[in-house]
Image (tube, helix red, strand yellow):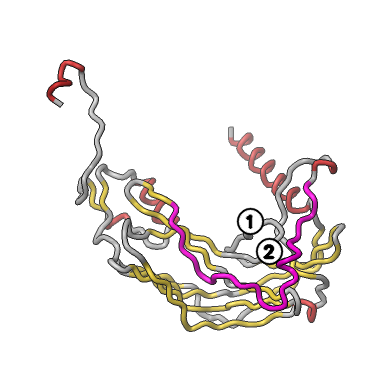
Amino acid sequence: MKCLGKFVALSVSALILFVCLSYSQTGRVYRYSFKNSASEEIKSDGNSVLIQYSLPELIIENVTNSAGDFYRIRIPGHSSPSETGKPELPVSSRLLVIPDEGTFAIRISDVKSERIYPEKKGFRGLLFPVQEGEIKQDQKLRPEFAIDRKIYAYTSLIKSDTVTVRKIGKVRNTTLANLVIAPVRYNPKSNFIEVITSMKIEINFENGLTPAVKSLAGESTLFSQSLAKGTLNYYPSEVITGYSDRPVEMILVTDTLFRKHL
């Protein structure tokens, strides 16, 4: 079974590599190192989440395909957006516990940024646009190269929210949201990128989170550990099992003999 698991993992890795290379071939790579000595810090209490965001480096690599020359940006710990045809700008996506009700405010301060002109480092063309994934080897079934001409016609920095929080849903009485940090913006006309190398992000909850997360049943250790690792502000030690301050919906399964008593 271990051999089979390794084979599946290698097959998936090869498939992902094929998808990435199907549209383009990469070559020259250049690393920009930023003077941020402090590592990222995250602090949280019942009323807010504080993130000292710090970007140690940014990687640029050239891309050549049938559409011409481009360059691509990569940041460790960040992923690419999914909007096909738009400039491929790395983002950081994380899970966040938010209140069931009420609102929250996002405040950004102490912003430090740098402007980078890839052309000065020998990279030709524009920033590579996001492409639709495909796994077919048949050239006839391969999606056409996508590029949003309207966006690439911008003469200034493409506007976008630096930090966004969107509610996802609930997991075992815990309301989760997706926190997205977008540190890079792009100017197609002048062909430069503006990178936020460090900033302070504060997310304040209007009514605060509940003093402790409530759970009607004992949480499994594995679940608690997984949620704690995957979110910025979930702490298993604060969970109170068997308690709720809200009405609880229940399903009763009983013999029809007792129907009139329900």
**Magenta span covers which residues?**
143-168
Q: Residue at x 80, y 41 (%)?
A: 141
- Residue sitting at 67 percent across and 43 percent down? 12
What numbered label is drawn on residue 88? Answer: 2
Q: CA distance from mark 2 to mark 1?
A: 9 Å
Along the viewing direction, whichever of 262 and 19 lies nearer the viewer: 262
In the image, farthest residue toward the left: 261
Q: Which mark is residue 82?
A: 1
- Local crowd at mark 1 within 10 Å, few (<14), some, or many (≥20)? few
- Using the image, determine if residue 242 lies above or below residue 207: above
Three-letter code for the amino acid on which mark 1 is drawn: Ser
User: From the image, which quarter does the C terminus lie in?
Assistant: top left
Total number of numbered discs in the rendering: 2
Q: What kind of element bears circle 2?
A: loop
Could you tell me which secondary element the residue under label 1 belongs to? loop
- Where is residue 126 drawn, in percent x and y? 78, 70
Q: Quadrant of residue 233?
A: bottom left
